[in-house]
Image: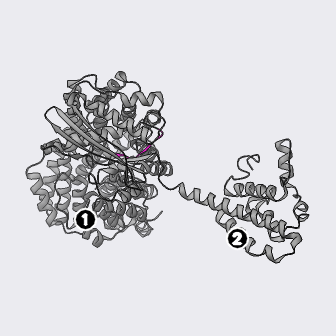
Amino acid sequence: EQFAGAGQSRIDTRSDIYSLGVTLWYLLSGRTPFVGRTMEEIRARQTSELPFEQLRSLHLPGQVITLLKSMLAPDPKDRPQTARELLSAVHRCYERFKPEARSRRRTGVLAGAALTLAIAAVALGTWMYQRTRAFTPMERSIAVLPFENLSSDKENAYFAEGIQDEILTRLSKIADLKVISRTSTQHYKSAPENLREIAKQLGVAHILEGSVQKSADTVRVNVQLIKAASDSHLWSDTFDRKLTDILSVESEVAKNIADQLRAKLTGQEEQVIAAKPTDSPQAYDAYLRGLAYTLKTGFTPANSLGAQKYLKEAVRLDPKFALAWALLSYVDASGYLTQSLQPTVALREQARQAAETALTLQPNLGEAVFAKGFYYYACFKNYDTAVDYFEQAHRLLPNNSRIPQSLAYVERRRGNWDKSEAYFNEAEKLDPRNVSLLSQHARSYVCLRRFPEALAKLEQILNITPDDIDTLVLKARIAQAEGDLPRASALLAPLRLGADYANALETQVYQAILESRPAAVIAQLKEILAKPDQALGYYNGELRFWLGWAQEVAGDHAGARESWNQARSELEPFLKDQPENFVLMGDLALTNMALGNNAAALTLAERAITMFPTDKDALTGPRPLDILARVAARIGDSDRSISTLEKLLSIPYEAPLAANPPLTPALLRLDPMFEPLRKDPRFQKLVAASTQK
């Protein structure tokens, strides 16, 4: 079948069934069904009538010969289709004749046939068992649970987190190990009782527990390696070190674990595990503090600013600290992409310099290679170059879930949604309880309007972190997209949100607008904007746009106009500093539209479309089209609005308002921005269409 060539025959279980049939034939007759000196001769004889007279001459039961005929059928679809189907056939064949009831002359033959069938049953049972075992945790697999902070100063929790993460990072660089990412283990307690269940949830055979006690310049680290199935301790040790020597502990622990799990290390892996990232204890302490911020859930402004602050301190204290430079670049680039930091040209340049400094210092540092790729992805949407770096980093960091996760992001923006999903699945094997990863996977389903699958993924998150606000809000946005406002309201009503929950707050405001009940959110927005948080940058202006929209729905036209004028005056300076920020262009386009500045609104929307075409970014590229459809509807250009809506409804994308769900027929029906189109038959046809594509 391999000889037949690609496209002519599929190699699968049925090919193995053929092989087993040949083996059984040999066991019964002492000969193979045929032989050949060349592949062509073997292929010709395989497709010819087989010499079943060999078997008949042995006076074998007809059932056995029939079974072998089916196993050796030239066409795979004429064979048993699965191992289980074949095993059932073997059992039926065995039961249909009783050797002891036959003549003595045939007893030996029948016993031989029975033995052969028994061998077949054992072979198949073993085969199926091994296939089942393929889904059990591999023996060289491990999860590192959170280390307990035993220091009297609870502020030292960051230090325990950092030691855990650094040990995990060193282990993850060993290709012969499967290492679960920290984001999946951080939800567990230190030293939990239900280790077997935790190992099952994470898909590993071993658990590493530990504790850290830091006092002045001394550190005690306790670790124990546990085989989860038996709850037995394979290895444990206590390390008492000066702070200046703490890095050697991480290397020793990783090496001991690799030895205990009999992992094969390459020479390069041994060097990487033993490497000391810095000689400065103060720089390392600052690095661990910055790292702790990156390990929090989500890239909020507070988390990004905290990480940036300490990582800058780390590289100031040790300018040759490549690992800190790499993480600083990742934080800057992530802040630029998510806009948790102000996405200025200066920030983008800072991300580049940090990545290049890390690579110059250590060209083979996986984290530095990854950081350079992430810079190209996040700051320039240069996906081809980013992928080159990610693939190089993957070879250096074989267990780092962030790499397949980033590849999933790249393929999503390229419009390769199926390929993106495959990378998400790969990342989730290494990081099965990473709520950020699961959330992004769910958001992909939302963009595709595959709402049932998105909801299933969100339930998975809520099983890990019940009452997670971002997850509940996304469930509400799905309900809005499906036109189920009561369901959305039930999810949103209990939430008390401030400006630090950007999308969540906007979703609450959008719900009030869709329901035409904006009084409560108007009061809420006025309270927030009375003392705006300057760290939120242009987001304060965006909130003022939403306030104006809510006031407009409430009938307070003068108040709405005042809010929109103030929003415009706050947003315009940011666009001067961030001339490529298409989110700002969209905010200003809608604000000018609301104020009746139609030409300015249209110019901004078209500028965003030109700068960020859909073919450059399938995920967020359609956002400016969404803005254009709204602007065109409001200024009376129904033809352009409807043609744009037709395109938007036919593609997956992430929407610009209360970010994520794309437009759906239900949202067109509910959203007051499309009121000017209500009587147009073409619009009515769009509203009547099905959401599912």
Q: Splitting the image into 4 quarters, where does residue 243 fall?
A: top left
Q: Residue at x 21, y 39 (%)?
A: 159
Q: Amino acid at mark 1?
A: Gln
| Residue 580 seen in the current view | no
What numbered label is drawn on residue 511? 1
Please state the extent of the stretch shown in magenta in the rendering: 175-181
4 or 201: nearer the viewer: 201
Q: Is residue 226 magenta?
A: no
Q: Residue at x 70, y 55 (%)?
A: 16
**Residue density around tag 1, few if under 14, some if 14–19, many if 20 or more, within 10 Å:** many
- Image coords of residue 690 (percent x, y): 45, 68
C-alpha gap between disc 1 and disc 2: 62 Å
Q: Residue at x 74, y 54 (%)?
A: 19
**Residue density around tag 2, few if under 14, some if 14–19, many if 20 or more, within 10 Å:** some
Q: Residue at x 25, y 30 (%)?
A: 346
| Residue 290 seen in the current view | yes
- Image coords of residue 177 (percent x, y): 45, 42
Q: Which residue is disc 2 drawn over?
A: 91
Q: Where 683 falls versus 377 (above or below)?
A: below
Q: Secondary structure at mark 2?
A: helix
Q: Splitting the image into 4 quarters, where does residue 290 fall?
A: top left
